[in-house]
Structures are given as C-alpha cells and as structure tokens.
Image (cartoon, helix red, strand yellow):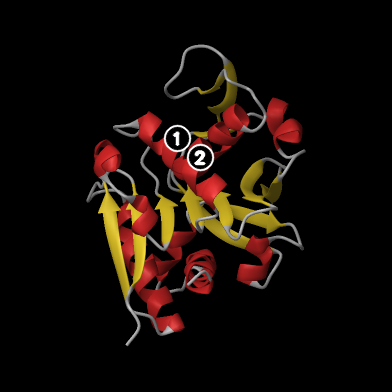
Amino acid sequence: MSSPLCLSLVGDYRANAVAHQAIPLAIERAARRLNLIVEAEWIATDQLDQTDLTRSDAVWVVPGSPYLNDEGVFETLRWARESGKPFLGSCGGFQYAVIEYARNVLGWHDASHAETDTGGRMVIAPLSCSLVEQRGRVRFDAESRIAQAYGVLESDEGYHCNFGVNPDFSDALGDNTLRITAWDEAGDVRGVELRNHPFYVATLFQSERAALQDKESPLVIAWMQAALGQR
C-alpha cells in the first residue's frame, strides 16, 4: 500500500468557522473520489517556525485572517510559490497570496492589507459590498486550472470576507506570471493562479463549502491530484 498523501492546512483553527468545518469534509470527499488515503494536519501559524513543510505533499493556506503569525504565512506562501509545492489558498489564503506576490515578484515592498496595515499600497482593500456569508456567481477563464477543475465556465460560490483585491491594482497584478482567472459578475477579481507552477491556485471564494451541501469541491480534488502527480 502506498503511503498516505500528506496535506498541510496552514491556519489557526476555529471550531466555529464555517470554512474550517467544511475543509475536513471536502478533503474526505476528494480522497474518496481519488481512492486515496490522506493525512491532513492543521498547522497553527504560530507553529510554522517549528514545522517542516517540505515533508508535506501539498499546502493549503486556509481562511481565518489575520493570522497569529502573518509573517510566517507570507514565508510559507513564498516557499510554496518558489518550490513548486502544490498550493491552494481560499479567502485569507487568497488575500495573503496576492500580497506576497506583489511584494516579492512585482517588487511592491509596501503592498499591504487594509485589515492589518495603516499605510502603504493597499493591494487588499475593503470590498464595496460585504461578502460575509454571501453567495454569488463566479466566471472562470476558459484556459484556467480553475475552469479545468470545474469543467464549466461559471459557478455559484460561497464567501465569508470583507476584503478583496483593490481594483486599482488588478491589471498590474495580473500582468506577469500571475493570472487573474476568476471574476464576479461585476468584473472584480475572485481567483488567481500562476502560469509557471505545477499547481498554485487561490480564490476569494471558499470552494470547500460545497462539502456542507454534500458536494465535492473540484478545486480540492485538483489540488490533491497535483500533489499525487508529484510523487
């Protein structure tokens, strides 16, 4: 029997967070679909300095920002981006992935998050309309990994957030190796991925919530498939 697929869930677990309730169920459904044995470990962000993520087959930066150790999360994101480790980010994981990319690839060292910072280039800013416990249509780039995972070009997805990509910076953010590949009906950014990476996908929406409706999350399945493919 092959060894279990080792998944690292980076974030500060809260039992009352809907996404945190959904994530284990989404992973369990994906494991059944792929006929895999999976070991998923929650890693509190204040333990990242003592954790060897190189032993993981894949990393998911889960919702729940601000994190106890924001800098540890940014370092994890940089490592996943540079190492080619299959990466999934949702909600806070999406927001922090955008900032890490802006800082370390675009050279915007003052890229900041309106939830935690008071100055700098506010790449992540308050949404014009809150998406806390909201749902909405999302459309996908036809050539994206997201569309490939879903097998369709749009989906109805759930959110729990007040912050997203500042529209003033969206064109510049998506004008390099990072691709903007998902949008809401107003054209605001809802998902990004890296062109030159085995699997690096981050979404503002929480695809894992599908598990709470007894459905599979296509992105969780695709993320685990990418991890399996690297073995």
Q: Please state if 75 lies on the left or on the right of 104 as rendered.
A: left
Residue 20 image point, x, y percent:
31, 54
**Residue under circle 1?**
74
Number of residues whose C-alpha sits closer than 10 Å to that of mark 2, classed few (under 14), some (14–19) or many (20 or more): some
Whether residue 229 appears in this view of the structure is yes
Q: Residues within 10 Å of mark 1 (few under 14, many from 20)?
A: some
Residue 78's disc number: 2
Q: SS class of the residue under badge 2? A: helix
Q: Is residue 167 toward the left or the right of residue 117 in the image?
A: right
Horizontal arrangement in the rendering, residue 82 relative to residue 182 (left or right): left
Residue 176 against residue 229 in the figure, above or below: above
Quadrant of res 36: bottom left
Q: Quick one: SS at disc 1?
A: helix
CB under 8 Å between discs 2 and 1 = yes
Q: Amino acid at mark 1?
A: Phe
Query: Could you tell me which residue is drawn at 62 percent across and 30 percent down?
Result: 102
